[in-house]
Image (cartoon, rainbow, N blue to C red):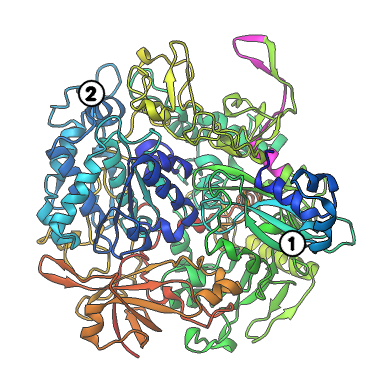
Amino acid sequence: MDMNRRQFFKACAAGLGGSSLALLGFSPQPVLAETRNFKLARTTETRNTCTYCSVGCGIIMYSLGDNAKNAHSEIIHIEGDPDHPVNRGTLCPKGAGLLDYIHSPSRLKHPEYRAPGSNEWKRISWDEALDRVAKLMKADRDANFVTTTADGKVVNRWLTTGMLAASASSNEAGYITHKLARSLGMLVFDNQARV
Amino acid sequence: MASLAPTFGRGAMTNHWVDIKNADVVLIMGGNAAEAHPCGFKWVTEAKAHNKARLVVVDPRFTRSAAMADYYAPIRVGTDIAFLGGVINYLITNDKIQKEYVKNYTNATFVLTESYGFADGLFTGYNEAKRSYDRSSWGYEIGKDGYAVVDPTMQNPRCVFQVLKKHYSRYTPELVSQICGTPKDAFLKVCEYIASTSTPDRVMTIMYALGWTQHSQGSQMIRTGALVQLLLGNIGLAGGGMNALRGHSNIQGLTDLGLLTDALPGYLTLPRDAEQNYDEYIKVRTIKPVRPNQMSYWQNYPKFHVSLMKAWYGGAATKENNWAYNYLPKLDKNYDVLQAFELMGQGKINGYICQGFNPVASFPHKSKIVGSLSKLKFLVVIDPLATETSEFWKNFGPQNDVDTAKIQTEVIRLPSTCFAEEDGAIVSSGRWLQWHWKGAEPPGEAMTDPEIIAGLYLRLKAMYAKDGGAYPDPLLNLTWAHKIPDHPSSDELAMEYNGKALADLTDPKDPKQVLLRGGQQLPGFAMLRDDGSTSCGCWIYSGCWTQAGNLMARRDNSDPFGVGQTLGWAWAWPANRRVLYNRASADPKGRPWNPKHKLIAWSGTAWSGSDVPDIRPDAAPEEEVGPFIMTAEGVARLFTTGMADGPLPEHYEPFESPLGKNLLWPNNPKVVSNPAARVFKGDMEAFGKPKDFPYAATTYRLTEHFHFWTKHAEVNAITQPQQFVEIGEELAKEKGISNGDMVKVRSNRGEIRAVACVTKRIKVLDCGGTKVHTVGVPIHWGYTGVTRIGYIANTLTPFVGDANTQTPEYKAFIVTIEKA
């Protein structure tokens, strides 16, 4: 019988379908008696792309939780996507560690604030954080926006606040970031492609 | 990218990863794919195993790519133009060029004006005070018919081929060997491998990365590689190309989307101060062909531009207000990152926002970067991780020795999601837009980047609507058609950059025929209009999300022709073409140069094959429509006016050179280093001199780490826990350094301490009698994360960039080393 690797995996992992096990040529009873359920059997598989270099390797993320409102989802395993034409299921030493990147102890969890001269972070709410940033931006923009040059050219630019955009954020994040930055008149604006 | 666009018309990897399997020769130079792009390198081993390919590696270190090579040659850091210029000389002298390709598909036949010249290491038009060129003397001679004059015999001494031949005749094997430190026999051996692909049925691919980009003459290094490929007829063919292996997972996408100081999405450009007149702005960008019958696709610029302005400003962009031309800021100069941090250091920038970007670790001359950030009023950091940048104000001992109390910068740190916690598309090096799906909720209260941007935008808009302020119009009129305004979905945004019809679109040939109803998604950029009836946020992406749905989400890996094109897997820009310029894979009559790896061919009525044709589908060969459809010439440019530092690449030394002189021009001190590269006041003085810093140095990645990210991931921190530097055995002996000793490496800008790894992989080079040792500096450590604390490698690197891109010169500088 024809099966690709993932179908095989599903069929093996379930430990439920007598029919699928029978397909593999096993009789269900002894198999059920001998194996404990694979942990991945209860996971949700989600396709994603490795976030590191530009090869764009396909990955499959296995997460707990069934998307129910109160079920907390958590990714517990990541492997290369065997169907992907470039990486064909493989991952390099960087990509093989993706799970530890997602669960890094360095992940930020809350907005934080460091006051001038202070030696510590203070936790703040999103509203406090975004209100503060928007206020700082507007004050600086209103004070320093250049509508026309000395010789009368219309330039509508804001040069005293700058922005660096990411290199691993998605196109959609990049697109909406660009839309806002230019509409503010920003020219001090670059992304990681520069370096 | 600043070199490929002036040469071929588009700034992107010409081919893609799987296509490497079709190569006969693979040249890896200026990169180390085996360690930096391991799963892509698989296709090199595939080519070796199944296509009898030969792998040639040229690198200052014997890398793991070199370990897999059929032939390896060492080279001194920063001398790749000398090496490749020597290759060009070899190919022309030994008649190893693909003549029919060169004659028909490049500007070799074009005749230059008499005003062009080159002497003493400088091209005509140089202004020493400004360190820049006036490029007006670099053009073509224009005939009475208004088109560029060509000489198909290529004998005219002013035709590009003859000029090129003369220019590189100076790059003799002897001189190459002296400059590069590559033994002459090794250089010639590499030439032989490369020259073997000058026949029409053999191809070479060049794989390069930041080892070419990150030099003060990096764009020209890439261009020299491109010239070699054009002379060999290797562009546009399966298994050929100039394959820029981009460093990050969506650098290609962010570049396509124009998040650069002077750009707009889809390689459109912002106006300069002087461009006060909209019609003039449009006219100079609407590039007319300089030869008959050429597509010169930028002729469509107005359609792309107007559709962008409609996507951003909707009804507020009208014909009457020149499609909201005043909403676009005008540039007095470029504000690239080096310029930004220079101004910040001068106290001229008050606020800065870092979105997923860690300049303290990533930018050169770390002490200057931290000093500049310390002068800000406010810094906003949006990141999934606790980066060095967000904690630049904390004292971490010698790794970041700052006086916290004196730093008056207000810092706000916002947690963002990572790839696993969002939907969206990222663009691989091969220009594939691959959609991905969210697999879990983010930790704590982290939000997606679009949500954070929306949070800021909606607040700013409300404040401007209520209180007024400086020029609020673009903000108040920005399109924001999101079902949940503070939660713009990736689907909505992707549909917006694909574009849609704003009214019914009729066939220009038959106005009764409706091609698309108002509101429908565009099938591709060919449908764009310049009358305001279409909107499109990024024209090159048009076709990614059509009426048929999200094509980036496709996952059909079938490869019916067996050449690896997989047209049903995700979606590639432009128009799902997988190999750029694939018209050049066939001869002028439309027959594939290599029938074994056929891309497209002329059927008698249309172009078709294993790839989407990169040419008008009904352009019959007799029409002589050139394969480089983005250029005004229709052909690729061996000679170009598109580069700031010269129409042909010329070797200059890195700004910090262990030789201190340019052996091509030993008597002209003005051309030791790139005469058109920008150097800020004070930075010239911060360059070291070889008498104090005698050793060449370069920075690079390890296979176990990715930049400054994986040091936050435990498994990677376990595999490479501690910072080290690599030196050769001879230098170690001279300095009394043993493997495992702690050493100090110092440049004129700072010092790092690390463990010494003494290796056979780095050899001492003989550069015309001067011995050059190289110190290798892996980059991955810093003062945050779960590895052992380390020094930022960029403490050492110089604050100078490429003349075209301002990409810093991380790959070639000078240091001294001693036991700590």
Residue B369 seen in the figure? yes
Image location (x, y in percent) of residue B559? 54, 33
Residue, disc 1: B447
* Res. B654 image quadrant: bottom left
- Helix, strand or loop at mark 1: loop
* Res. A124 image quadrant: bottom right
Residue at image position (59%, 10%) is B509
Answer left or right for A34 relative to B255.
Answer: right
Residue B347 seen in the figure? no
Number of marks: 2
Image location (x, y in percent) of residue A97? 59, 66
Number of residues whose C-alpha sits closer than 10 Å to that of mark 1, classed few (under 14), some (14–19) or many (20 or more): many
**Is the same chain shared between marks 1 and 2?**
yes
Which residue is at the front of the view, B117 or B50?
B50
Quick one: quadrant of the C terminus of chain A? bottom left
**Amino acid residing under circle 2:** Val
Image location (x, y in percent) of residue B536? 63, 35
Position of B494 relative to B66 (above/below): above
Residue at image position (18%, 40%) is B91
Which chain contains the residue that carries disc 1?
Answer: B
Quick one: quadrant of the N terminus of chain A? top right
- Tell me, yes or no, whether the highlighted magenta stretch contains residue B494: yes
Answer left or right for A76 relative to B211.
Answer: right
**Magenta residues (range):** B492-511
Residue, disc 2: B150
